[in-house]
Amino acid sequence: MEGITYLDHASATPVLPEVKEAMLPYLDELYFNPSVVYDLGTKVKAEVDEAREKVASLIGAEAEEIVFTSSGAEANNMAIKGIPFGNPKKGKRIIVSAIEHHSVLNSARFFERLDYEVTFLPVDHHGVVDPERLRRTISEDTVLVSIMHGNNEIGTIQPIKELCEVAHEAGAFFHTDAVATVGNIPVDVKELGVDLLSLSGISLGAPKGTGALYFKRNTRFMPLIHGGIQERGRRAGTENVPGIIGLGKAAEIRAGRLAKRMEYLKGLRDTLVQGVTAQIPKVHFTGHPVDRLPNHASFCIEGIEGEALIFLLAANGIYANTGSACASKALKTSPVLVAIGLPDVVAQGSVVFTLEESTTQEDIDRVIEVLPGVAQRLRDMSPVWKEAA
């Protein structure tokens, strides 16, 4: 869109033109159900299977290890609930990190009502889960460990390979929410060693309402949606064929230009971080300074309210967020920022910028130009800031 600076790509990315073009035939002339036995349907099924191959290739998986879902949240629910229900004799303990997405946290809390013990693993001030802390916490009755690969609110990337090794030593399954990382950094499920991994089309330039769950071959889990034989009996319901075709095309595109994309976005991100921290006093750059998403810059600005900041930025044609898109309307302190040790009065000044290949140097310059003045305007009205000053 002309005239705006949109830097909230973690909550929504535009559908890539090539993706839209690939989807269009399946919205009208190729509308056939892939589950039917006649040739019109089997041709569509072949295209769905090709899309499955493309998604699998992006993360180093086999096609049969991919289940298409309606979102990353559904994939997370399928993993967190499907493993304990599918392996009832393994144990009744689940471990997740304290900074997981709500779809993981609330799925884990669901099991507390079923007399499971759920442990929320602390993180350090950068939002990193220490593998040794997990080692000290895990026990032989732990059925599942779930720790996200990259955090969409502070950008930190976790040492998943090391964490997964600890979980497997104890005999537990390991799941990672990789919605923020797949398509943004290299992700290889075999190298990471995970049993399950969630991804979402919304982060790849695919349409909303698309996602997938990787699960290692021969992993036992119980489906959430029962019915027909779609997705080899793992998720019933007629497939979202246009969405699946779009997700496959987006995965193919990201795989082909991942390295170039990372280099470009990291340069813009670093410029943004340097500009904001240099011009605004008492601003906290959140997340790990090095091991973080290349397109992600997050800050907490003392003495202001994040929601007010977002509204004023929008009035200036700049669009960012104040945390997870799933929680930004809750108007309460982010549990992620609390978990990394920020006091409420600081955490409430959160602002998150997430970039995309369409982001330009002019967009970054615009933020650096406008943000300090907006922050100062809010501080001038803030009794908290006046008291601190």
Image (cartoon, rainbow, N blue to C red):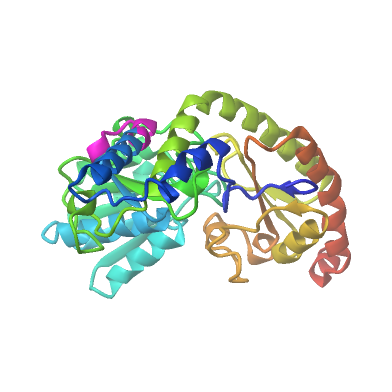
Q: Per the image, is 56 magenta?
A: yes
Q: Which is more toward the observer, 45 or 28?
A: 28
Determine the residue positioned at 21% across, 64% down. 226
Where is residue 115 shown, x and y percent of the image?
Answer: 23, 73
The quarter of the rendered structure image containing the C terminus is bottom right
Query: With respect to residue 23, does 139 lie above or below?
Result: below
* Residue 9 painted magenta: no
- Residue at (81% x, 50% y) in the render: 371
Q: How many badges with numbers are in the image?
A: 0
Q: Determine whether, in the image, residue 121 is placed left or right of residue 359.
A: left
Query: Looking at this view, is 188 or 277 the one in front?
Result: 188
Task: Tell me the residue at 19%/59% (across/down).
Answer: 228
**Up-down: is 60 above or below 372?**
above
- Give the prevailing secondary structure in the magenta stretch: helix
Rendered location of residue 235, percent (x, y): 25, 56
Residue 195 placement (x, y as % from top left): 26, 43
Q: In this image, 293 relative to 119: left or right?
A: right
Highlighted range, magenta: 54-64
Q: Residue furthest bottom?
A: 113
